[in-house]
Image (spheres, helix red, strand yellow):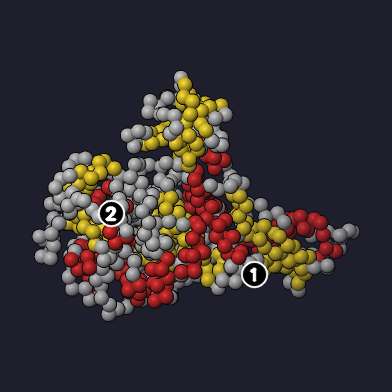
Amino acid sequence: MRTLELLAPAKNLECGKAAIDHGADAVYIGAMKFGARASVGNDIDDIRELCLYAHQFGAKVYVTVNTIIYETELDDTKNLLRALCNAKVDALLVQDMAILQLLPNDGSYVPALHASTQTDNRTAEKVAWLQSIGFERAVLARELSLQEIREIHQQVPEMQLEAFVHGALCVSYSGLCYASQHCFHRSANRGTCAQFCRMKFDLIDANGQEIVHQRHLLSLKDLSQIDDLENLADAGVCSFKIEGRLKDVDYVKNVVAAYSQRLNKMIERRSGDYRRASIGEVSYTFTPNLKKTFNRGYTNYFLHQRQPDIYSPLTPKALGEYVGKVKELSHGSFNVAGTASFANGDGLCFINERGELEGFRVNRAKGNRLYPLKMPSQLKSGMSLYRNNDEAFNKILSGKTAERKIPISLSLSMSDHGLMLKASGKGLRAVKEVVEIEAQFAQKSQRDNILRQLAKLGNTPYVATHIELDEEVARYFIPSSVLATLRRQVIARLEIEQSVPSAAPKTIARKNARLTWQPEYQKFPYIYNISNSVAKSFYKRQGLTMIEDAYEVNPQSKSQSTAQQAVLIMQCRHCLRYSLGYCVRKGGKKPTWKEPLRLRLADGKMFRLEFKCDECQMNVYADE
């Protein structure tokens, strides 16, 4: 039987606890530094508290240390790793291979190592190499199809595979995007991405002819694979990852609840094959709805092979759920044709006649008659209307929306040493506690009082679903204070038993492997992202001969192999030629333009496109 994990993002401690409460089996969170989201760091005390909270439910906490590390930061990184080990985090998500050398090696607790998607995990060869050097899990590239995932699992069956199933998509293979660094000196590999791919571009051909004017040509829709959890599990995925460490607690509640419920339904049908990775039963006070959460429109991306409708050229912003057509405009108000209900404060939007997104807030809603705070001048009858802020749904999410409890059985009996209380439950180690008492027979049965006192589990994560009393016990008078003390001791023992066991020290082998996983690695060695001397030494020991500094370290310094070349800043499976209907290999029209094509930003910067049809890949180069 395989264990399946729902992995949720945690912007902070509040989001992390909410994720656990709403059904996550694990959460991933950033520390104060080196977490690939520079704006959302968390101190060690909060991470330690989150670990204690999660471990009650057998859930895990993974900490992202997945930026590249500069030479001057090696000591800080080493200190951070020691602190995270002491906090008993369950795993570290890693990009920079220096981390493997900086972990404590004194026999103390060391978390598991997960290879971040930033390490470009798209082939079985790469995943096998990662396993050989000490990684227990690889976070797969978002671009992979079910068949590609299945092949990786078949070739590296002992490696845990984690796949993104929901959230924002990067257009470039993760870890290989240098566009933000090149244009704005803000590195995606350092957690400060400037969202280059969400910008407007012109598409022009080699003669300067404009093919597309000012559209978001690299802006992808958001990922949603909620309908494919079973397919992914059958292909070998063990962890389903929700993107969103910048998202607030409402997003976490809604998305985690939706995926947890769907995963439970699948496991109910396949109980002989799969089980959840954590324990506890969740009760919800709301119905999750992914359409009401921030999204740019949804796509399952390349999971079922290539499809054209994966990007959102009109806007990089949240469009929201479709709510109807505009009709009957009058002074300061209009009607909506549809069945949706509205509330004061709703945020609505539409695509105007220029193909641009416009939004407005509803000041007053009277049935399907809406009175905007300011009437949009571009709003026309017949336009499609979308809601990207649902005030009524937000109000529901602002309250308590879920409770997670662990069912336990309690058994009270007399022993040779006194009164003994045992506790057990699915996924728990059975525990017992004994207190000495002076046995005094009661005038009447104490059964009801004993049951009432033992059931008072209050703010603990446990609920007593079955309480068994030895017949002899009910005959004695047992003070309520004694029962309360015994109950607290048993619960404390349960919590101790849920603590994380020590992990084995990691060993790093030298694998005789070809380290050029794609042709670009040999041609552009900076994409190994080697930014410090420790990582450089590591790769030398692994047999890498051509070592070049990461692009962020010195963008102007190129090795002899790349000195005369344009800078490769993106490798994308998203292909504009295909999306515009001009991929001849896929049945598209024959292009009428002259290549190479280029993207042009509003400031005039140009980026050449290379279509590698044999690999079904589009490379983006910065023209010098």
The mark lying in front, picked from 1 and 2, is 2
Left or right, 423 with respect to 65, comes to right
Say which quadrant the N terminus sits in. Answer: bottom right
Pick whichever of labels 1 and 2 is earlier in the sequence: 1
At which x and y percent is residue 599? 22, 48
Q: Which residue is mark 2?
A: 589
Mark 1 neighbour density, 10 Å: few (under 14) some (14–19) many (20 or more):
some
Q: Position of residue 435 (x, y in %)?
A: 71, 65
How far apart are the alpha carbons under marks 1 and 2? 67 Å
In the displayed structure, does residue 419 sit left or right of residue 489? right
Picture quarter containing residue 353? top left
Amino acid on which the number 2 mark rests in the picture: Lys
Q: Residue 398, relative to residue 524: is it above or below?
A: above
Mark 2, Cα crowd under 10 Å, few <14 / some 14-19 / many 20+, is some
Residue 278 shows up from this direction: yes
Residue depicted at x 28% and y 57%: 583
* Nearest the eye: 32 or 242: 242
Residue at the image point whose x is 58% and y is 60% from the top: 264
Residue type at the position of mark 1 = Ala
Q: Nearer the viewer, residue 442 or 350?
A: 350
Residue on which the image places disc 1: 430
Q: Residue at x 29, y 42 (%)?
A: 215
Q: Could you say which disc has been placed on residue 569 in the image?
A: none
Visible in this render: residue 188? no
Foreground pick, 465 / 127: 127
> Extreme top residue here?
331
